[in-house]
Amino acid sequence: MIDVPPAIQTVDLTKKFWRRRSLRPPFRRGPEKVALDRINLTIQTGEVFGLLGPNGAGKTTLVKILCTLMLPTHGRAIIDGLDVVKNSRDVRRRVGMVYGDERTFFWRLSVLENLRFYAALYRIPGKVADRRIRDLLEFVGLAGDAQVEMHHFSTGMKQRAAIARGLLHDPEILFMDEPTRGLDPLAALELREFLRNRVADGRRTVLVATHIMAEAEDLCHRVAFINHGRIQLIGSIEQLRSALRAEDAHVLVVSQIDRLTLETLSHLNGVHSVSITPLQPATYRLEVTSERGAAAIPSIIREVVRQGGNVWSSVPQELTLEEMFAIAARERDLAAPGEGITDVLGSAPPLTPVEMKEGVR
């Protein structure tokens, strides 16, 4: 059996920048800023991986190193078994890049002319380039606008053109840095649907760097939280929820029962708290927290029915990615020096090809 290397792997990857002080001579360095601090990642072929974090967390720096646009200070970055420093030319043939703030097109040229220019840079033969450009414009829905000068394009159309350019040389790995930046909610939703249904085909590895949590939850098999240059959590959405959730939470709607009876529900085994909100006469919304894995909600439902009440709904409340990131950031602030949240909670293993094929989110 052939041992296939990971699509992307980093080992203690570190990047430091020197801050210059205006009063110092140019040749004297100020204090250093650590943009990436010992990043360790393993991303399998065909995986859609989300790199989440606030602005300034180190996402773009990591992507630039993986694309050979920046050299690391320490550690290694490996793309498809190739070191990004020692084998930079071969790495560039295997990767494509899509920026959210796209400024590298020639706006007075048509998208067709732009793609022909970039095809020449990739040294793609003319006939092959024309066929591939035609297929890509059809693929991204811009075939009818091929001759339109790009300064007439909407932001969403520019993003689709950027995706076409990123796929021009048929890369095995596609990096997308803030792909929906500047898009209105409807255009962002359409672009995410396009990426999920057309680009993330299981053959190509995609790394999406974003601070938009809904985007990562919609697209990615696994995500990593990065903050202050350090990876804090890695895993699927469900793995992270399981690791960070201290208790179960449910919302129930009940009726035909008095408030005094509902207040006694907090004494049932496994129930931590019951918050009661009146909706209309004899109808209440219950926010229940309980011990993880306990049969508290069935006990509450049985008790409500035993008291003559009705249960209209019972909905579990999951942690959102925003809440998970807030917890991860808080844990980082509380951690001892040199200790990361991944050390506390453990790093989830990569998904198997079967799990990726089944669309684990």
Image (cartoon, rainbow, N blue to C red):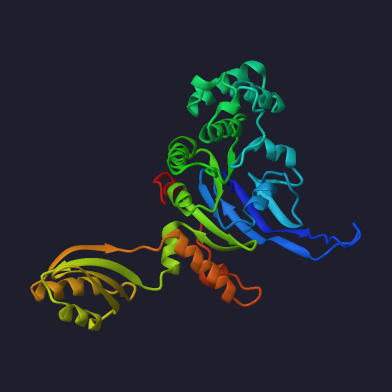
Residue farthest top in this picture: 127
Above or below for 272 versus 54 = below
Camera-nearest residue between 277 and 237: 277
Q: Residue at x 77, y 57 (%)?
A: 73
Q: Position of residue 335 (x, y in %)?
A: 59, 75
Q: Position of residue 226 (x, y in %)?
A: 58, 60
Q: Residue at x 49, y 59 (%)?
A: 235
Q: Position of residue 185 (x, y in %)?
A: 44, 44
> Which of the 4 image quadrants contains residue 172?
top right
**Count of marks, rendered view:** 0
Residue farthest left in this picture: 308
**Quadrant placement of the N terminus:** top right
Residue 197 shown left or right of residue 58 in the figure: left
Q: Residue at x 90, y 57 (%)?
A: 26
Residue 268 shown left or right of residue 143 in the figure: left
Residue 48 shown left or right of residue 165 in the figure: left
Above or below for 251 versus 81 = below
Q: Position of residue 61 (x, y in %)?
A: 68, 52
Q: Residue at x 71, y 54 (%)?
A: 76
Residue 312 shown left or right of residue 293 in the figure: left
Camera-nearest residue between 28 and 152: 152
> Which of the 4 image quadrants contains residue 230?
bottom right
